[in-house]
Amino acid sequence: MEDGSELMKDMNSRSREVFRCLVESYLETGDPVGSRNLARNLTEKVSAATIRNVMQDLEYMGLLNSPHVSAGRVPTDLGLRMFVDGLLEVSNLDHTDREKIDASVGGSDVGGMMDRVGQALSGITAGASLVLTPKQEAPIKHIEFVSLGADRALVVLVFADGQVENRVFTPPVGQTPSSMREAANFLNAIAEGRTISELQKVMGEEINRHRQELDRLARELVESGGALWDSEGDPNERLIVRGRSNLLAGGTDVQDLDRIRTLFDDLERKRDIADFLELADQGDGVRIFIGSENKLFSLSGSSLVVSPYMNSDRKIIGAVGVIGPTRLNYGRIVPIVDYTAQLVGKMISDRG
């Protein structure tokens, strides 16, 4: 099948107008759109019969679909992609929305700020917000291990700027209070004044150097606790999702509820969330993932509007986005996400 850009070239002006009007009506109401409705809204006076023929052609092209037994049509994921890429008109950022976003930033605690940003985004857009927070690169002041049970422990990182990070992990079997103290003492002796990435570089060397003096359990504890700081898994620990209840608002269709539950399950497991940063890294600015275009949303039928944000070195360090049904108001949400990402990047750069 042709992609959206090729299909757009194949369409005449009437087909484009019918398609644009249908998608805009669907995004506004969420209901299938019929030929009579379109006939009333088109600028060109066209009969309902002519519009039905155009709609059949668009359906054959894979841009429209007929849900259930309805006479109306809805856009497919491919149709929405073509609309977003070629016909979407992005509005200016609303003054009220801007004020709410501005009010969410500030304060000395980056984690608290990112949580407020997520709450603001979900409130403004009536969707669920996704915030991937930056990796902590302040020097470490102190490290502590806390037992939460036989198979769960907490590593507490206190940074020189006063921020604290807590991460739960599975400790080695048989760990004792003394081995936890020994592991913490060992790490504190080499960690103070170093950032996490700097500590990663020296930790392996120091473990090998002190292998004889370090108790086996303490050594395993350092290694398993230290694995949390590996950049590969780090994004999974730094995800904030707010406003999931918004996705349930007005949804009574059993199939829709099942899709939303699937999305919730995926978000809870944070499956594939780390991919977002890599996806966002492929280009500056806002990116839109519709339905099956992203494996996280392929079953739930949701869309993601996401933008990376950068530090003062123009390095991508996180992302902000909005999750909702494919029937999102893309024209309004794109500038909201874009502005939020730029503002967050500026605030973090100013702190550095």
Image (spheres, rainbow, N blue to C red):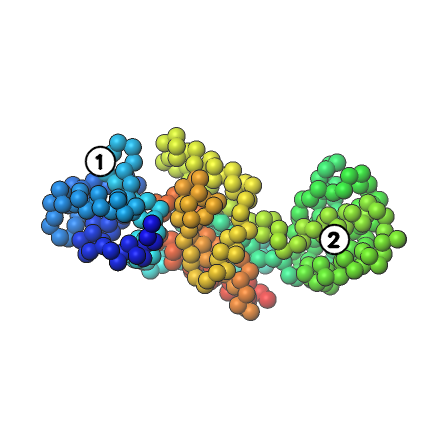
- Could you give the CA–CA distance between mark 1 and mark 2, rounded to whole angstroms? 64 Å
Q: At which x and y percent is residue 25?
A: 25, 46
Residue lying farthest to the front in this orientation: 1
Badge nearest the viewer, 1 or 2: 1
Residue located at (46% from left, 62% from top): 283
Q: Is residue 114 visible?
A: no
Q: Residues within 10 Å of mark 1 (few under 14, many from 20)?
A: few
Say if 162 sits above or below 251 in the image. below
Residue located at (53% from left, 68% from top): 314
Q: At which x and y percent is residue 82?
A: 32, 53
Give residue 246's quadrant in the image: top left
Say if 37 sits above or below 133 in the image. above
Under circle 2, the secondary element is strand
Residue lying farthest to the bottom in this orientation: 313
Q: Is residue 296 visible?
A: yes
Residue located at (58% from left, 65% from top): 351
- Report the number of discs: 2
Q: At which x and y percent is residue 248?
A: 41, 37
- Position of the C terminus by quadrant: bottom right
Give the amino acid at mark 2: Ile
Give the amino acid at mark 1: Ala
Residue 196 is left or right of residue 182, and the answer is left
Q: At which x and y percent is residue 322?
A: 44, 50
Query: Residue 143 shows which numbered tag?
Result: 2
Residue lying farthest to the right in this orientation: 213
What residue would you read off at disc 1?
A: 71
Tell which circle, 1 or 2, labels the residue nearer the N-terminal end.
1
Under circle 1, the secondary element is loop
